[in-house]
Structures are given as C-alpha cells and as structure tokens.
Image (tube, rainbow, N blue to C red):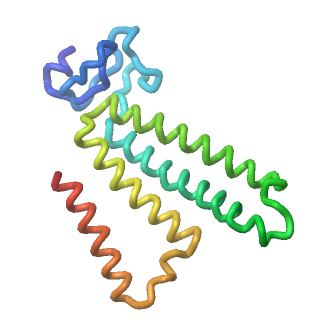
Amino acid sequence: VAATAAGTRCAALEAGEALQAEWRWTASLPQSSRSAWCFPGVPPLVASAWALVAAISTGYTVLCFKCIAELLAGVRTAPTSPLLQWEFYIILVVGLSLATFELHCLNLALRSGDAVKVVPMYLSLGMLAQMSTGGVFFQEFDDFRSAADATTFAGSVVATLVSVAAM
C-alpha cells in the first residue's frame, strides 16, 4: 500500500482502475487481484517490457504469415501443393500461436500501463521488428541499389520513431 502512495506504476485492480504507480509488490495486493504473471515478493513486469515482447512477437508472426503467403502464391507453379506438406501446417500453427501470444502480451502491457504510451511504443517497436525479420530472413535489405537508398530508408525510420517518441 505504501508503494502505491509513493507514485509507483502497477497493474490494474479488479475494478479496472489503473493505478498511477511505477512498481508494486505483489505481496501488497489482495489475493483475488493478483495476476497469474505476478509472483510474491517480485515486482510485476512493467508495461514497456510487455509491449517489447508483444512487438518482437509481431515480427515473428508476420514472418510466419509471409512464409504462408509465399507458399500459397507458388501453388500453381510448385511440383507439389504446399497444402500436402507437413511443414506448411507447422508454420501455420506457429503463426497462430505467436499471434495469440502477441495479443496476450499487448493486453498485459495495456493492463499495466497507459494506453497513450503503450500503443505507440508497441506499434513503433513492432514496425522495427517486422522490418528486421523481413530484411534478415527474406534479404529485403539487399534491394537497396545505393548507399543513398539505405540512408533515405534509415532516415525515414528514425524520423517515424522520433515522432512517436515526441508524442
């Protein structure tokens, strides 16, 4: 209770009220309002950490569904249908699992922080994660024809992130 009065950030209580707190020890919460992700004696994870995990999950979710789209786009030219391959279904299950995990982490971030800060952070970090996974796994960064192209792209990404941070 003293941690709440000190102005620390914490998870919302059962009534849905967001506390204006930075940290809160789970032991001081009533048993009925403790999250499954909180452990006695350990401070709960902050909203920015959950937003980061959700954003990283976004990158891999998009990667899985891009793989599925690429497989389905080549159905007519492929010697055998990707729908007959077990790997297709593994990618599909992993993609759906990551999408579910991503939404769960985003909900935890929104539960433990202000939406005005969590949503822009999640979207901007998600954009970086998607660009990174696409650039690494599909060699999309190789499409830059010159250093000027890469510099222009990097500058526009930085400008977008600075704009989000300035909000």
The image quarter containing residue 152 is bottom left
User: In the image, 45: left or right of 97?
Assistant: left
Q: Is residue 109 above or below residue 164?
A: above
Q: Residue at x 37, y 21 (%)?
A: 41
Placement of the N terminus among the 4 image quadrants: top left
Q: Residue at x 49, y 41 (%)?
A: 102
Q: Is residue 92 visible?
A: yes
User: In the image, 11: left or right of 96?
Assistant: left
Q: Is residue 28 visible?
A: no
Q: Is residue 99 above or below residue 83?
A: above
Query: 83 or 130, which is in the foreground?
Result: 83
Residue 43 location, x and y as percent?
34, 28
Q: Residue at x 50, y 71 (%)?
A: 135
Residue 83 location, x and y as percent?
79, 54
Residue 22 location, x and y as percent?
22, 32
Numbered label tally: 0
User: In the image, 99: left or right of 28?
Assistant: right
